[in-house]
Image (spheres, grey):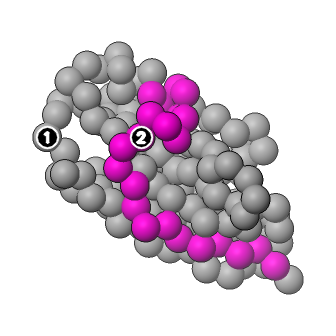
C-alpha cells in the first residue's frame, strides 16, 4: 500500500511563494507517477502538475503555468511543488496523489493526463490560504 504525506502550506500574501513537499512510500511496481491536485469548495478536484518516475511532466492547469513547478526531491519518492506569485484564487486544499504500474508508458500517460480519477493513493491534504 502506497502512503503519502504532504508538508508545507499555510498562509501567504498575494504575490508570495510556498513550497509543498510530498513523501511517498510503499511502491511495489516498476513505475509510478506522483501529482499535485487542488480542491476548492464547490468545485471539482483538479490536476495541477504530475510527474512520472521516468520524468514525464505535464503543466496540466493553464492557470498555474509559469508560476508552479513540480520536481523530484533529493529523497527517493519525494515530489515538491514550488508555487510562486500566489494569488487569492490559488486558495484551497492541495493533495498529492500517486499511481503505480509495471508499464512505463502507462506511467507517462498518467503524468500527461494528470486526472484525479487515475490516481489511487492520496495524501491527507495541505491547506494553502492566499490573503492579505
Height in image: 21 above or below 71? below
Residue 84: image quadrant is bottom right
Q: Position of residue 112 (x, y in %)?
A: 53, 26
Quickly name the residue at label 1: 28
Residue closest to the eye, 20 or 99:
99
Q: Secondary structure at mark 1?
A: loop
Quadrant holding the C terminus:
bottom right
Residue, x 36% and y 20% (percent of image)?
Answer: 106
Residue, x 25% and y 28% (percent of image)?
Answer: 101
Q: Position of residue 45 (x, y in %)?
A: 62, 50
Height in image: 10 above or below 110? below
Residue, x 33% and y 55% (percent of image)?
Answer: 78
Whether residue 85 can be seen here: no
Residue closest to the eye, 24 or 116:
116
As drawn, is 75 to the left or to the right of 83?
left
Depth check, mark 2 against mark 1: the one in front is 2
Image disc number at residue 119: 2
Whether residue 92 can be seen here: yes
Q: Position of residue 11 (x, y in %)?
A: 68, 81
Q: Position of residue 24 (x, y in %)?
A: 29, 56
Tag 1: Cα neighbours inside 10 Å, few (<14), some, or many (≥20)? few
Height in image: 85 above or below 119? below
- Find the magenta span and give its range: 110-131
On whether residue 4 falls in the magenta region, the answer is no
As drawn, is 11 to the left or to the right of 76?
right
- As measured in the structure, the alpha-carbon distance from the residue carrying label 2 to the one carrying label 1 is 15 Å
Q: Secondary structure at mark 2?
A: loop
Residue closest to the eye, 95 or 12:
95
Q: Residue furthest front?
A: 42
Amino acid at each position: 500500500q502506497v502512503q503519502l504525506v504532504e508538508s508545507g502550506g499555510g498562509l501567504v500574501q498575494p504575490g508570495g511563494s510556498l513550497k509543498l513537499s510530498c513523501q511517498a512510500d510503499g511502491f511495489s511496481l516498476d513505475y509510478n507517477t506522483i501529482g499535485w491536485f487542488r480542491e476548492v469548495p464547490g468545485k471539482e478536484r483538479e490536476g495541477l502538475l504530475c510527474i512520472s518516475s521516468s520524468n514525464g511532466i505535464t503543466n496540466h492547469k493553464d492557470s498555474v503555468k509559469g508560476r508552479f513547478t513540480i520536481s523530484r526531491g533529493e529523497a527517493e519518492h519525494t515530489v515538491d511543488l514550488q508555487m510562486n506569485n500566489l494569488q487569492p484564487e490559488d486558495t484551497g486544499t492541495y493533495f498529492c496523489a500517486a499511481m503505480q504500474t509495471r508499464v512505463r508508458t502507462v506511467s507517462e500517460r498518467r503524468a500527461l493526463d494528470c486526472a484525479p480519477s487515475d490516481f489511487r493513493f492520496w495524501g491527507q491534504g495541505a491547506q494553502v490560504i492566499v490573503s492579505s
